[in-house]
Image: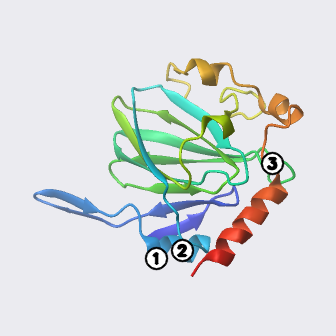
Amino acid sequence: MKVRELSVPGAFEFVPAVFPDDRGLFVAPYSSAAFVEAVGHPLHVAQANTSVSRRGVVRGVHFADVPPGQAKYVYCPRGALLDVIVDIRVGSPTFGRWDAVRLDDAEYRAVYLAEGLGHAFVATEDATTMAYLCSTGYNPATEHTVDPLDPALGLPWPSDLPLVLSDRDRAAPRLADALAAALLPEYAACQARYTELRSAAP
């Protein structure tokens, strides 16, 4: 498993070895040992989610209140997508920065994003499946979204795709409005949460 931290601190890309043969292939998109070595604590999985999207569907930018926040480990077992991580932590030195990774069913790359980071993706093929492990369960009262088409963010959505958004995501506030409304996670609270997780690690 190859691992690198992305340009948004707290986000990592994991590249597993893929073993093809005449029957198909075998791959392990998640390795606890590689994860702990990179992140500094185990991944607590409270919920596993799957979404299926047609080409051009955008989901996000989603995030949860911190504490506790919701960390995610995501990969694409079918199709292809562009996964985007946005630093929306107020007070972060990289506030507003984003990074993007192609996830697909050829290389089975995975992305981890820590609590407090924003997450979005666009499906670039029909019937694209995203699987993601979440550190906390679904709690609509603490989950929010930022407009993925906010020009101030300038997210790298492909220009050749007709983008399809949910009503919720289309009506989401822009980053500046979410900041003014005090909806965004505080960087200090996120750092405290990361320290708590590392301190509790066996």
Q: Residue at x 63, y 38 (%)?
A: 62
Label 1 element class: helix
Between residues 2 and 32, which one lies in front from this camera angle? 32
User: Relative to 80, does residue 112 appear above or below in the rendering?
Assistant: below
Pointer 3 residue:
95
Corner quadrant of residue 86: top right
Q: Is residue 76 left or right of residue 90?
A: left
Mark 3 closeness class: few <14, some 14–19, many ≥20 residues within 10 Å: some
Residue receiving disc 2? 36
Tell me the kind of residue under disc 1: Ala
- Ranked by sequence position, the earlier of labels 3 and 2 is 2
- Please name the residue that numbered disc 1 is placed on: 33
Q: Nearer the viewer, residue 81 or 91?
A: 91
Give left or right: position of 98 versus 54.
Answer: right
Image quarter hosting the C terminus: bottom right
Let me know if residue 19 appears in the view. yes
